[in-house]
Amino acid sequence: MVNYPWTDATQERLREQLQQDRIPHALLLAGAPGLGKEALAEQLAAALLCLQPEEGRACGVCRSCELLRGGAHPDRFRLSPEEGKTQLQVDPVRELLGRLVLTTTISPRKVAVLYPAEAMNINAANALLKNLEEPPGDTVMLLVSHDISRLPITIRSRCQRLQINAPEPEAMAQWLMDQSGQGREPVNLALEASGASPREALAMLEAGDLERYTELQQQLGQLIAKPAQAGPMAAEWADAEPQQLWRWLSLNSALLLRLLLSGTHPSWLRTERELPPNKLAALQQKADSNRNRLGSGLRKDLLLQEWLLEWARLPSSEPIR
């Protein structure tokens, strides 16, 4: 498991609480994507389930740890949206709550990890709410959230919140260079393509996804003021992973807006006309909205073509100053 050094202080605090038997029944791990919150939740779950924890850490050798490693622990539960879906529906939450009322099988307690917690729709959140104050039996619920503003205040108020903050950019870049063995230039590009998410940046560096990101960026630069090219570009990117594609479109809208407002003209931008900041901001919001609408039955090819057409029509009639 990858180590995220900026979570060390939080890990130490949790180990102390575990040793003193002061772990709350509901924890909310909050922070930006890719900071290691999920890994932290899994480490805590392992320690909570361990039959012979050592200084607040899972021993790694007991029957509980063996089952957890094999993905077959009867007292550990995980709830996430179904593949291809962005929302966590109420029925899986109700099913989870029904299983939590059963007695433990091996470990001293049951542990449920919900990831990401903000994916719950309102019915799912309401169903969970009834069990957060007093979870059934010896249960600890670990909620992992990238955006707690999307969680109902009633959910947040019933959990102890642990905020995971991003490290300084220099520390993040150094960590990525140490982990990947790559230089500063690809690391900086990976941080840009991941929205400054260390975990996603590392995955991109290891998988070699950066070439695909720069290809999209170059095509966006060439699409400016060429609406006729929106359809062919949409067809070319139709098979791309939709969550990643819409995230990249959002990130590039925000990046271009930030650069233009600072007086910088990026090398990949092929236009001699002014780009209205309000239109760029609206396109970023639309990309985020379309990403959240994935799985809703809407035709993703038409959504992409419409967005690219609006991107192509960005320029005003005024030249760049």
Image (cartoon, rainbow, N blue to C red):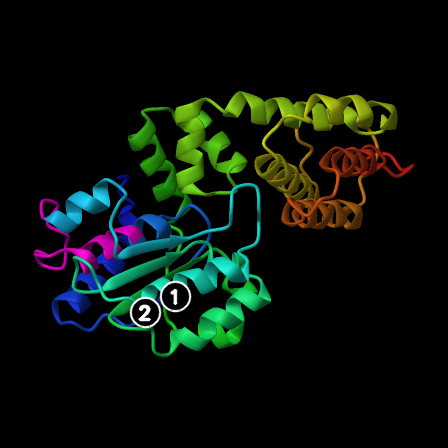
Q: Are marks 1 and 2 in contact (CB under 8 Å)?
A: yes
Q: Amino acid at mark 2?
A: Val
Whether residue 11 is situated above or below residue 274 in the rendered picture? below
Q: Quadrant of the N terminus?
A: top left
Q: 60 left or right of 284?
A: left
**Can residue 49 be found in the magenta stretch?**
yes
Q: Amino acid at mark 1?
A: Gly
Question: Which quadrant of the figure has residue 84?
Answer: top right
Question: Which residue shows up at 48% across the image and 43% down it?
Answer: 196
Whether residue 73 is situated above or below residue 218 in the rendered picture? below
Question: Which quadrant of the figure has residue 312?
Answer: top right
Of residues 34 and 123, the one nearer the viewer is: 123
Question: Which residue shows up at 28% across the image and 68% down it?
Answer: 139
Q: Residue furthest right?
A: 317
Residue 294, percent across and down? 65, 44
Please give the count of numbered marks on the rendered protein.
2
Q: Is residue 134 visible?
A: yes
Q: Which mark is residue 98?
A: 1
**Can residue 105 be found in the magenta stretch?**
no
Q: Which mark is residue 164?
A: none
Q: Quadrant of the C terminus?
A: top right
Q: CA distance from mark 1 to mark 2?
A: 6 Å
Residue 159, percent across and down? 38, 72
Question: Which residue shows up at 85% across the image and 35% down it?
Answer: 313
- Stretch in magenta: 42-62
Q: Residues within 10 Å of mark 2 (few under 14, many from 20)?
A: some
Q: Residues within 10 Å of mark 1 (few under 14, many from 20)?
A: few
Q: Label 2: which residue? A: 101
